[in-house]
Image (cartoon, helix red, strand yellow):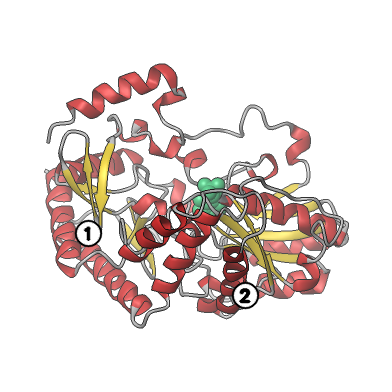
Amino acid sequence: MKHSVSEQDFQKACASIPGGVNSPVRAFANVDCSPVFYDHAQGSHVWDVDGNEYVDFICSWGPMILGHRPAAVDAAVRAQLDKGVSYGAPCEAEIEMAQEICRIVPSAEKARMVSSGTEATMSAIRLARGFTGRPKFIKFEGNYHGHSDALLVSAGSGVATFGIPGTPGVTDGAVADTIVLPYNDLEAVEKAFQAQPDSIACVIVEPIAGNMGVVAPADGFLAGLRELCTRYGALLIFDEVISGFRAALGGAQERYGVLPDLCTFGKIIGGGFPVGCFAGRADVMSALAPEGPVYQAGTLSGNPVAMQAGLAQLRELQKPGVYERLEELGARLEAGLNEAIERTSTRACVNRVGSLCTLFFTDGPVRNWDDAAACDTQMFARYFRGMLDRGYLIAPSQFEALFLSVAHTEEEIDAFTTAVVDVLGDIAR
Ligand SMILES: *Cc1c(COP(=O)(O)O)cnc(C)c1O
């Protein structure tokens, strides 16, 4: 496979964009090659600027759950273009979006739209602090909640991939009230609450971790967090930016039957446009300005094009069979990967929740960040390059998920896992 145009583009990009990319996770630096520049996409396929075709297992990091260019979303966007692209004033699509979210998401009674997942989590933390009048919060190692200062400690995703130890530019003061604990360790959370029962405003958690690779919540972990938060008067925040509208229509909270006080969304909810949302208990959400005293704002929040795209996507997701289909495809992928591991005697294991799946290069099990960090990332890099050569785009990091869409087919999953057997076989030889 030839990548000469992508390579030239990357050289040009590096001259005017730091590192050549507008988000670090897009760089292929940790898999020892230069990134592919996309030209266009359709369904489960993308084409790069060299004319290579790939089956896409990144899906824009989650938003393209229907595949690329679903007809319903395209049509909704085109229709809105004729009516104006931004108003900075209320429009009816915003009401419809809030109503949809409150109907679909079990814990949502009111919702506020923002423009990214980062904004959603940052605002939810501020709201929790404002509502409870407490300064501190708990987050978990390897969970990623966007790049706002207080949340950028022991974060997953790009921070983990690039091994950035803390982040220059984030002051000690900004993270002084951030308590970081191991994922799936309820005892550690209980101890933290016992140590400072009156100062913890909230616990924020990825109810299904997706940014250290996929890690499911241990039995009782989410219910235990719920119980501790209630007991100590803290709020529970589920960061469902990945799991929302994916783990189930109503997200991880529906899948596991545990209700947070607040939850955050992004990715899927924008239908591919820059959108985020935080939602939850009416009494807590009502503390937001202009109803209450906690300030939060956004010039492009509730943007009409983004709302129409998101609404069209949410409507498609409510058609019968979507989540059964995603589960089937996920199960097929998991089985194929496990078979590939066995046939090639590779030291690896697979974690999967629904349509999110990670092949970890470690004996496993992987239950938290320490387990994930034990992976052989050199091995991952060789696997990544082998798959790229065979026409499969996967996230260029061990600490990310394979994202499935309803546009993927059984044949594509099977061809993918057959290619994994080839690649792992080549590496073993
Ligand atoms: C992607 C992600 C975010 C940040 O969303 P952006 O839109 O990239 O700012 C926050 N939380 C989780 C769980 C995510 O996966």
Q: Quarter of the image containing the N terminus?
A: top left
Is there any visible trace of residue 159 in the rendered image? Answer: yes
Decide which of tag 1 and tag 2 comes sooner along the chain: 2
Position of residue 404 relative to residue 125, above or below, is: below
Give the quarter of the image for residue 330: bottom left
Give the amino acid type for the residue marked by disc 1 in the picture.
Ile
Where disc 1 sits, the SS reads: helix
Position of residue 305 relative to residue 164, above or below, is: below
Q: State which mark lies toward you, 1 or 2.
A: 2
Horizontal side of 378 relative to 400 (left or right) equals left
Numbered label attached to residue 341: 1
Give the amino acid type for the residue marked by disc 2 in the picture.
Cys
Relative image position of residue 311 (x, y in whole percent): 48, 66
Mark 1 is surrounded, within 10 Å at the Cα level, by few (under 14), some (14 to 19) or many (20 or more) other residues, namely many
C-alpha distance separating marks 1 and 2:
42 Å
In the image, what residue occupies the spot 48% across and 40% down? 158
Horizontal side of 12 relative to 6 (left or right) equals right
Q: Nearer the viewer, residue 185 or 266?
A: 266
Residue that mark 2 sits on: 102
Q: Nearer the viewer, residue 13 or 383?
A: 13
